[in-house]
Image (cartoon, rainbow, N blue to C red):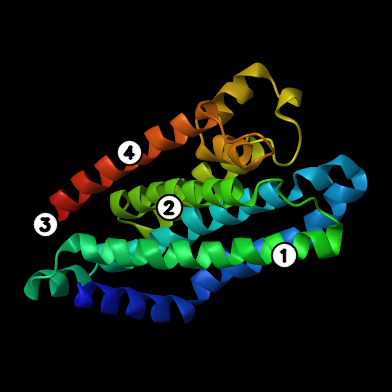
Amino acid sequence: MSGFWYGTALQWKLDMRSKSLLVTCYLVPLIFFLLMGGIFTSIMPEMKNTLIPAMIVMSVSMGAFIGLPPSLIETYASDIKKVYKANGVPLYLGLTAMFLSAFTHLMIMCMILFFLAPILFEAALPANFPLFFLALAIYILVSLSIGCVLGLAVKNQSKLTMIAQLVFLPSIMLSGIMFPIDLLPEAFEIIGKIFPAYWGYRLMLKDGFTLENLWCLIFVFIIALTVCSLLLKRKK
């Protein structure tokens, strides 16, 4: 157990020095928040009530789908995997360490948005803090589990970039964070419900912590964990 926590702490330090993680988990989400937060609240003042969940969905999706998978490729599609095997280290420990490190970084970024939004854009704070942060944690876990699947399933960096964008962009455009989902054609609305961002956004809204919004996220998380387990077994 001490070795696991040492590995997790080491992964945290490595991620702190990663330019890719700095860009995807902090820089791009923060720039998007500063630019679009003002635009959204100026054009649609009522969006102050949903600005925090909306910006969080974008930030988490960016970090989970574009930031985490390249780190997994660097480990499991390189000689680092052989080092794990040579030293008798279970392959899942590296995945778990990167998962926990990414979770911490995304939670930090979300907390930054949470505190800045009311100050900069007069965004409304959640009515129920415990339920909001529970919903946030669940959404981060589910998003990162999908990022793990991408990082383990794709072996080529260029292909990963393309596939990650194919997951990230619909998650943002069809989730309802940028404009009401009712404005989209019915087919797009149905497609949007496939992505966790749709349900995670609604889970964080006022009175949104319901079984209807929760069950889909739990289902996706279980499927992603199962797929990750199978992919790790193939890599042994």
Q: How far apart are the two marked residues, 3 and 1, measured between alpha carbons?
A: 44 Å
The local secondary structure at tag 1 comes to helix
The local secondary structure at tag 3 comes to loop
Frontmost residue, 231 versus 204: 204
The local secondary structure at tag 2 comes to helix
What residue is at 82 percent from the left and 47 percent from the top? 48
Q: Which quadrant holds the C terminus?
A: bottom left
Q: Quadrant of residue 181?
A: top right
Residue 120, horizontal then vertical, whole percent: 84, 64
Residue at which label 1 appears: 115
Q: Residues within 10 Å of mark 1 (few under 14, many from 20)?
A: few
Comes first in the chain, label 3 or label 1: 1
Foreground tag (4 vs 2): 4
Residue at which label 3 appears: 236
Q: Does residue 64 appear left or right of residue 96 in this picture?
A: right
Above/below status of 220 relative to 158: above
Foreground tag (3 vs 1): 1
Q: How far apart are the two marked residues, 4 and 2, measured between alpha carbons?
A: 12 Å
Residue at which label 4 appears: 222
What residue is at 52 percent from the left and 59 percent from the top? 63
Comes first in the chain, label 3 or label 4: 4
Q: Which mark, by number, is residue 144? A: 2
Foreground tag (4 vs 1): 1
